[in-house]
Image: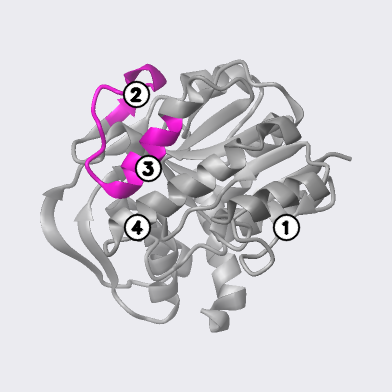
């Protein structure tokens, strides 16, 4: 069995990777108390102590919604990335979680291709962090970056993530709030775990892959779908007119690599997540 080191295993994506891959691989998922990824010596000692095949880098200080202390978060996130990369001779491969924000979310991102990277430098700290990581990965041999656009599923923070927030509000008979309608390319977390598993087993042909279904959907449509699932007429409040910047990608490279891979239908995935919240809603 391969030994997989998952950073950020306590977060949304990390939890799902840990839960779904735990029976297939030996997983190392130290908490922050067990391993401070900002401590260069501690990280080096961890790699020396453990024989690791693959690193899956899910760690991100503050995540994509940090508004305060952005310079500090940028510095810490880069330090974590380079602490892992510094020990590249002690593992075989790194799967790095990139972001569509690398293409610069200050403007519409519409069916963007991997070769469009670098045409615009991200204006936000999170996007710039991911951008800098990609610039470095361009010259690395054993690192593959999966650029995530929209993703949803259990364990995501329902306070900030639209789909889970809308489901929870529906279940609690509260209005579904939409700041402004926008088109996303959403991937269900279970599909993403399968994609990660593919790259654990196989050598990637390319260094960068946009992670998307190739199909876009807007927030208002999703809200109506949730109403259909719940058999309720939850009020949908749209605070600002018009459409915000689209956030979608071209997934040709991914589909060419995973030839027989099929994404779950959005409606099926939405039903699964709604059922999960209905069962565990009291915990939210």
The reply to whether callout 4 and callout 3 are in contact (CB within 8 Å) is no
The mark lying in front, picked from 1 and 4, is: 4
Q: Secondary structure at mark 1?
A: helix
Residue 24, above or below 159: above
| Position of residue 132 in the picture relative to residue 241 (left or right) | right
x and y percentages locating residue 26 in the rendered image: 84, 49
Residue highlighted by disc 4:
72
The residue carrying mark 1 is: 19
Image check: 159 left or right of 241? right
Q: CA distance from mark 1 to mark 3?
A: 28 Å
Q: Residue at 69% of width from left, 66% of height from top?
A: 34
Q: Residue at x 23, y 27 (%)?
A: 120
Q: Is residue 265 visible?
A: no
Above or below for 144 versus 99:
above
Magenta residues (range) = 110-134
- Cα gap from disc 3 to disc 2, whole angstroms: 14 Å
130 in magenta: yes
The image's mark for residue 93 is none
Nearer to us: label 1 or label 3: 3
Contact, CB < 8 Å: mark 1 with mark 4?
no
Cα gap from disc 2 to disc 1, whole angstroms: 33 Å
Do residues under tags 3 and 2 come within 8 Å of each other at their CB atoms? no
The mark nearer the N terminus, 1 or 3, is: 1
In this figure, which residue is indicated by the disc labeled 3? 129
Lower position in the chain sequence, tag 3 or tag 2: 2
Q: Is residue 2 left or right of residue 101?
A: right
């Amino acid at each position: 069995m391969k030994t997989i080191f998952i950073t950020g295993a306590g977060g949304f994506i990390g939890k799902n990777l840990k839960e779904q891959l735990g029976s297939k691989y030996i997983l190392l998922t130290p908490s922050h108390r067990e391993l401070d990824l900002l401590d260069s010596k501690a990280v080096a000692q961890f790699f020396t102590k453990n024989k690791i095949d693959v690193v899956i880098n899910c760690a991100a200080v503050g995540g994509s919604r940090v508004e305060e202390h952005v310079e500090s978060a940028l510095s810490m996130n880069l330090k974590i990335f380079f602490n892992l990369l510094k020990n590249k001779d002690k593992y075989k491969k790194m799967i790095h979680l990139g972001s569509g924000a690398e293409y610069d979310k200050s403007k519409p991102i519409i069916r963007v291709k991997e070769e469009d990277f670098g045409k615009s430098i991200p204006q936000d700290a999170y996007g710039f962090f991911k951008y800098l990581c990609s610039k470095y990965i361009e010259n690395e041999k054993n690192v593959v970056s999966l650029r995530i656009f929209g993703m949803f599923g259990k364990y995501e923070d329902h306070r900030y993530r639209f789909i889970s927030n809308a489901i929870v509000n529906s279940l609690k008979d509260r209005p579904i709030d939409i700041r402004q309608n926008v088109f996303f390319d959403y991937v269900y977390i279970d599909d993403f775990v399968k994609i990660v598993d593919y790259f654990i087993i196989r050598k990637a042909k390319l260094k960068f892959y946009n992670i998307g279904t190739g199909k876009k959907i807007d927030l208002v449509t999703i809200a109506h779908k949730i109403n259909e699932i719940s058999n309720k007429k939850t009020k949908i409040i749209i605070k600002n007119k018009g459409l915000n910047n689209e956030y979608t990608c071209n997934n040709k490279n991914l589909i060419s690599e995973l030839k027989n891979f099929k994404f779950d239908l959005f409606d099926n995935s939405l039903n699964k997540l709604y059922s999960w919240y209905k069962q565990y809603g009291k915990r939210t």
